[in-house]
Image (spheres, rainbow, N blue to C red):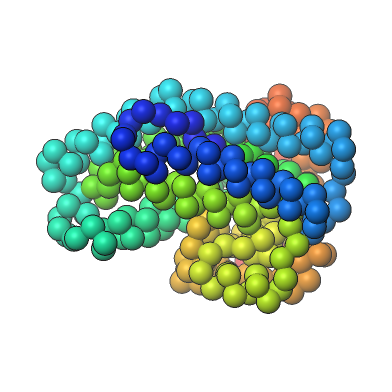
Amino acid sequence: MIIVLNAQVSTSGVTEIRPWIALGLLAFLLLWETVSPFFHFPKGRERVRHGFRNVLLGILNAVVTTLIFVGLWWSAAAWAESRSFGLLHWLSLPAWYAWPLAILLFDAWTYYWHRINHRIPFLWRFHRVHHSDPHMDVTTANRFHTGEIVMSSILRVPLIVLLGASIEQLALYELLMFAVVQFHHANISVSEKWDRALRLFIVTPYMHKVHHSRWQPETDSNYSSLLSIWDRLFRSFRINEKPETIRLGLDEFDRPADQTIPGLLRTPLANRKANRPRKP
């Protein structure tokens, strides 16, 4: 869910091309948003400033991840490989089963991690940086507090060991996941017919707009990042038949100062509670 810088931890072609795919998709979706936006957000300099702040935060997170955690993930995968430790090693599946299963398991964890970020108040303090964007677009896919990225990156170390996953499998999952994350955050017009068909398999713009709603029952739904099956399986799926009526962002973080880089980084320290009904 962040831009990941290219680290020389693997000879895998996936690792080498994933930053270029992410940048290419970002440019494509920015153009799509310009030609056919869903919401009519501010344009010109304000749009540039908004996107710059989000992408800059993503770059900061990418630097932290690359310098601190990519090597740890590689070491965890190498340790599990050398000892044949972890679920994927114990199952001894051929590659055409092991790789899809690895992606499925990584995505299940991402769903669970996202859900508890909404349920545990301490984690929500960091995650609300992502939800406080009132003009959600493709750049919002990069808008996460560094504290949240650090916590999720630390937890990936034991996850890789327990799964017995390779760094190449993780790289492929991140490539697929971030591509879909960029797509469903984008402020693009997609026909209801196509959105309905796509969300049988992946998370779509209509589906994720609900998750970024200011109304708490909608905010606490649609936690999936790549595959939409998890929300259906764990009964957190929700759709709004009139997505144009959804109000994005968080009421308690609407001040201009909250939308600056310093304001975003200070968000976890702000003691503000939303005046919104929670799910019963």
Give the residue at x 69% y 59%.
209
Q: Residue at x 23, y 57 (%)?
A: 95
The answer, for residue 17, to whether it is visible in the render is yes
Q: Quadrant of residue 24?
A: top right
Number of numbered markers: 0
Is 72 or 196 nearer to us in this picture? 196
x, y (%) of residue 217?
Answer: 67, 63
Image side of residue 193 versus residue 159, left or right: right
Estimate the x, y position of residue 257 in percent, counting from the top left: 81, 29
Q: In the drawing, does residue 222 fall left or right of residue 82?
A: right
- Horizontal and vertical percent position of residue 215: 74, 59
Residue shown at 65%/72% (left/top)? 194
Residue at far left of view: 83
Find residue 221 and report its horizontal and vertical position in percent. 60, 62
Residue at x 40% of width, y 48% of height: 172
The correct choice, above or below, for 87 with respect to 259 in the image is below
User: In which quadrant is the C terminus drawn?
Assistant: bottom right
Identify the image quadrant of residue 160: top left
Judge by depth and name the residue closer to the eye, 23 or 147.
23
- Is residue 279 among the parts visible in the rendering? no
Q: Is residue 79 above or below residue 41?
A: above
Q: Nearer the viewer, residue 228 or 235?
A: 228
